[in-house]
Image: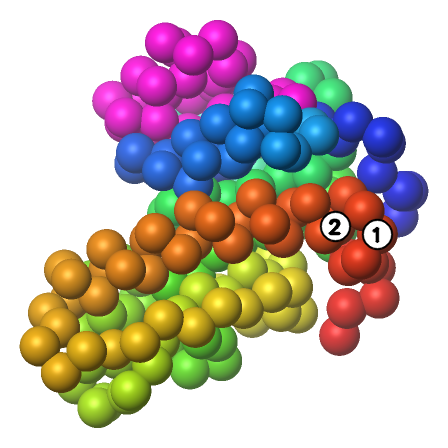
Amino acid sequence: MHALPVVPRIAFLASHNGTNMRAIVAAMRGGSLKAEPAVLISNNRECGAIAWANENNVPWAHISAKVTGSDAAADVAIAQALKSHGADLVVLAGYMRKLGPETLAAYHRRILNVHPALLPKFGGKGMYGAFVHEAVIKAGERESGVTIHLVDEEYDHGPVVAQATVPVEATDTPATLAARVMAREQTLYPETLRRIFSSAIDLDRLV
């Protein structure tokens, strides 16, 4: 895969509020992350991520199977939109759909996802949002955390790019643990992107 340019263009896929997208774009515009936002793609026209993109001059596109007629057509449209906006790297920020083969092939080892636990624990189909934190607490774990990983054709499966831990307190509920994990996500994602751009992390060599 080609090397990333000096100022990479990052595309985002989000289904809800795009909280991590907002943190990453803030880092770009604050000067601590040398990159540009390329486009936001969402399957949910009414989501907070699109509203935020509208207000903050980030191009966006609404692409879903419902709009395009099928999952396969949506996959092709997503890959085309990413290419047409000059995306070098794709960041999933709470995107609730599985990516298709066209997008995965077009951006092989250039798609990142964040998972609100320490993979391989508490990952896989159906493990998202509150379900993850409920499972962590129920299992009696003393720590949880954040995993950033490369995306492949399986849920929460690709090579780990970075991880960070957060404590699980005895009094935690899924909501309080989620808030602690989300706060760490918003610092780890920009930190990890800086390490990728500085070549401290080589996405092509991760196993």
Identify which residue, 100 or 184, lies in the foreground: 184
Under mark 1, the amino acid is: Ser
Give the vertical position of 194 relative to 26 (above or below): below
Under mark 2, the amino acid is: Ile
**At 77% from the left edge and 43% from the top edge, which residue is drawn?**
197
Give the colour scheme shown: rainbow
* Disc 2 and disc 1 in contact, CB within 8 angstroms: yes
Residue 87: quadrant of the picture: top right
Secondary element type, mark 2: helix
Q: Which quadrant: the C terminus?
A: bottom right
The disc at residue 196 is: 2
Secondary element type, mark 1: loop
Between the C-alphas of marks 2 and 1, the distance is 5 Å
**At 25% from the left edge and 22% from the top edge, which residue is drawn?**
46
Residue 136 coordinates in the image, percent (x, y): 26, 80
Q: Residues within 10 Å of mark 2 (few under 14, many from 20)?
A: some
**At 56% from the left edge and 21% from the top edge, which residue is drawn?**
29
Give the vertical position of 113 relative to 16 (above or below): below
Residue 5 coordinates in the image, percent (x, y): 86, 31
Q: Would residue 166 appear left or right of 130 to someone viewing this image?
A: right
Identify which residue, 100 or 126, lies in the foreground: 126
Q: Would residue 107 appear left or right of 154 to someone viewing this image?
A: right
Residue 110 coordinates in the image, percent (x, y): 72, 47
Mark yes or no: residue 34 visible: yes
Q: Which residues are magenta?
A: 36-62
Asked if the stretch drawn in magenta spans residue 52, the answer is: yes
Give the vertical position of 3 relative to 192 (above or below): above
Mark yes or no: residue 97 visible: no
The disc at residue 199 is: 1
Asked if the stretch drawn in magenta spans residue 39, the answer is: yes
**At 84% from the left edge and 38% from the top edge, which residue is drawn?**
4
Q: Would residue 181 appear left or right of 79 to someone viewing this image?
A: left
